[in-house]
Image (cartoon, helix red, strand yellow):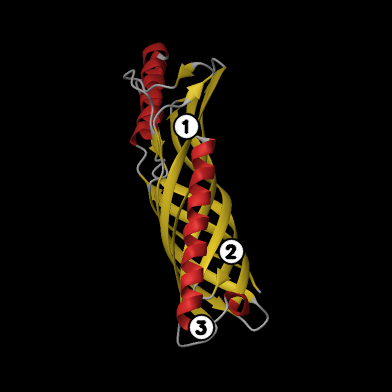
């Protein structure tokens, strides 16, 4: 998988260099005179379908509620599970970008997370149980960019696309109170993913840069490994997870 990532990076860089050389030849300019460098940081919020993670947390909560209702009779079947979804993602990224005229290349590293949670409680009893299923992902990606200046010389639109190596971890964390018990399971998987984006940048005279954009990702995890074992759903199938979807991001940095 790592070899595939490096191959993707090399492929992207070769295409970008070729495109940049062609651009310079056509307009008669040397790319060096218009080279620009950016270092940026951003926060992001997005949507990604994670039905397997949601189902795992929900099934665990329903099982706990049924156990409490069967064993704590005086609670009068009042235990129930309240569930939250892992369909919403959040995270941050750090970007380094180098432009040659209208074309550019970039490298990005970040951290993104999505969590499903099921909390079992009763208004008539103190016992409770909580299940958290968390997907955490560290992407290392490469991108190609094309810049379109706006009417203001300080702003531009940016279109980009690329591929990268996504290292994913799935954590199943279950805690029960009275009787006290807990269980933690962690699975890992790394995959190649793809992305495309459109972004608006505003650059101040000092170089301080503010930007916002939309990014679409395709990143699918289908087989998390906990040691030699595959993490499975309650139905016995391999548990899947995803960062695939749309996220909006905003941030700041410097342009040189």
Give the labeled residue for mark 3.
Answer: 28
Q: Is 132 located above or below residue 25 in the figure? A: above
Residue at 46% in and 27% down:
224
Residue at 33% in and 36% down:
51
Of the numbered discs 1 and 2, the one sitting upstream in the chain is 2
Specify whether residue 166 is in view: yes
Crowd rating for badge 2 (residues with CA inside 10 Å; few <14, some 14–19, many 20+): some
In the image, is 198 to the left or to the right of 188? left
Q: CA distance from mark 1 to mark 2?
A: 34 Å
Q: Residue furthest left?
A: 235
Residue 63 x, y percent position in the rendering = 37, 20
Crowd rating for badge 3 (residues with CA inside 10 Å; few <14, some 14–19, many 20+): few
Specify whether residue 126 is in view: no
Question: Helix, strand or loop at disc 2?
Answer: strand
Q: Which mark is residue 97?
A: 2
- Whether pointer 1 and pointer 2 mark residues with C-beta atoms closer than 8 Å, the reply is no
Residue 204 picture quarter: bottom right
Give the labeled residue for mark 1.
Answer: 133
Along the line of sight, the residue nearer the viewer: 85 or 156 = 156
Residue 34 x, y percent position in the rendering = 59, 78
Question: Helix, strand or loop at disc 1?
Answer: strand
Residue at 58% in and 64% down:
97
Number of numbered discs visible in the structure rendering: 3
Residue 10 x, y percent position in the rendering = 53, 50
In the image, is 160 to the left or to the right of 35? left
In the image, is 249 to the left or to the right of 35? left
Q: Nearer the viewer, mark 1 or mark 2?
A: 2
Residue 144 x, y percent position in the rendering = 48, 61
Question: Helix, strand or loop at disc 3?
Answer: loop
Q: Is 28 located above or below residue 167 in the figure? A: below
Along the line of sight, the residue nearer the viewer: 213 or 158 = 158
Q: Nearer the viewer, mark 3 or mark 1?
A: 3
């Amino acid at each position: 998988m790592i070899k595939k990532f490096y191959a993707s990076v090399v492929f992207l860089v070769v295409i970008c260099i070729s495109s940049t050389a062609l651009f310079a030849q056509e307009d008669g300019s040397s790319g060096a005179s218009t080279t620009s460098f950016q270092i940026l940081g951003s926060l992001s919020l997005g949507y990604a379908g994670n039905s397997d993670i949601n189902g795992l947390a929900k099934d665990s909560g329903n099982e706990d509620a049924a156990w409490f209702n069967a064993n704590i009779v005086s609670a009068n079947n009042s235990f129930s599970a309240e569930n939250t979804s892992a369909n919403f993602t959040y995270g941050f990224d750090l970007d380094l970008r180098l432009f040659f005229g209208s074309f550019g290349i970039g490298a990005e590293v970040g951290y993104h997370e999505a969590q499903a949670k099921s909390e079992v409680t009763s208004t008539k009893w103190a016992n409770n149980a909580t299940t958290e299923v968390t997907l955490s992902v560290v992407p290392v990606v490469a991108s190609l960019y094309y810049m379109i200046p706006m009417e203001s010389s300080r702003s531009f639109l940016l279109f980009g696309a690329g591929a990268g190596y996504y290292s994913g971890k799935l954590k199943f964390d279950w805690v029960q109170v009275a009787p006290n018990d807990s269980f933690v399971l962690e699975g890992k998987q790394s995959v190649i993913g793809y992305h495309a984006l459109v972004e608006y940048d505003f650059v101040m005279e000092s170089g301080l840069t503010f930007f916002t954009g939309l990014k679409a990702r395709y990143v699918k995890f289908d087989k998390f490994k906990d040691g030699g074992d595959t993490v499975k759903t309650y139905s016995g199938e391999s548990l899947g997870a995803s960062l695939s979807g749309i996220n909006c991001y905003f941030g700041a940095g410097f342009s040189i």
